[in-house]
Amino acid sequence: MPHDRDDAFAWIDAQRERRDRAGLVRRLSPRPADSPLLDLASNDYLGLARHPEVTAAAAAAAHRWGAGSTGSRLVTGSTELHTTLERELAEFCGFEAALVFSSGYAANLAAVSALSGRDALVVSDADNHASLIDGCRLSRAEIAVVPHADPDAVRKALGAAEAAEAAEADAGEAKAGKARRRALVVSDAVFSVDGDAAPLAALAGASRSYGAALVADEAHGLGVLGEGGRGAVHEAGLAGAPDVVVTATLSKSLGSQGGAVLGPARVIEHLVNSARTFIFDTGLTPAAVGAALASLRLLRREPERAARVRTVAMGLYGRLAAAGLAAVRPDASVVSVRAPSPEKAVRWAADCRAAGLMVGCFRPPSVPDDVSRLRLTARGDLTEEQVEEAVDVIVRTAPTA
């Protein structure tokens, strides 16, 4: 529509109308402190967000260190709690060092942008999370988007770039003294929509064939996969590798807030000096740090929590598939159930809510394949009775095709 010179935001109304017609309007739904709904929508995989030890640790940290961190990490925003969490998180996951950020989103922006750059190549999985995609965009690197979970496609992208670089050198077009091009392979460790795990060992092999580093986002793997919840990278035997970097969030399995990057000590030192979302962002609040540290210690003490999440996820999947629903077999904690259309997905989620069950509802553009679905999150603290109740509600309210 033509621009209205008297209304600078007239274009917003036009976009809203298009969203309305497509059934894609999103609305905030504040939850009460004590919701009566059975929760299969949150990312509180281990059920630790309300654990007494975790909430007490958050309160104690706020009382001792204050409500806010008061500044960026390089000025006044680092406390003893931050460095303790970084040390224990790195040790738990098997890496030399870790760096805590204000969110998992900020951690991904930092890792991708600071480890690539204008002259680099970033090979990115087509189904990567928005934060990784935005990190690619901010990096100013050349981006090669490859088919989902396809190590051969990664190998071809890296090989094509190397061949092009060699051809340039043979043609005498390369600048004298120019260093070999940096390359980065970026992938979710567990993908957030369907809950499938990336072929990390094969991705690492493809990366190493061309001297590229691998960055894996463990947002949905930490606390669920690997020995005692140490993550998919640890499970793949890649923890502590000199060419592997992990990003993670503290807001899912650890029930708190914030993010982290883990990897070789020299990588972490580089991020401290070059990652804009670290240097220029206010540090994570002490309460969130204290809560994440308490959750991490609780998980170390009770490693069976990770296995319980996987058991619940498989139980949900098995029952839903047996009922004839289009459920996707989970590799971790996310169980995806496909819906016929965006409108029917929204109605399905609303009907579940009316029946006492909260589920996630993913629609375009949040889904890479444009297929709307319910997104269920298995929690380790769910009982068998609650799982049965959830399945009953989902099946009873399922829409027809």
Image (spheres, rainbow, N blue to C red):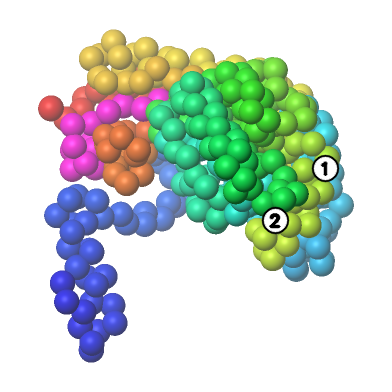
Element carrying mark 2: loop
Amino acid, disc 2: Ala
Amino acid, disc 1: Arg
Provide the residue designation for mark 1. Answer: 266
The percent coordinates of residue 302 (x first, y second) are 71, 22
The percent coordinates of residue 42 (x first, y second) are 47, 39
The percent coordinates of residue 118 (x first, y second) are 60, 54
Mark 1 or mark 2, earlier in chain:
1
Crowding at mark 2 (Cα within 10 Å: few <14, some 14-19, many 20+) = many
Residue 275, numbered label: 2
Is residue 44 among what the camera can see? no
In magenta, the rendered stretch is 332-350
Membership of 346 in magenta stretch = yes
Quadrant housing the C terminus: top left
Quadrant housing the N terminus: bottom left
Q: Residue at x 53, y 25 (%)?
A: 155
Specify the quadrant of the image occupied by residue 278. bottom right
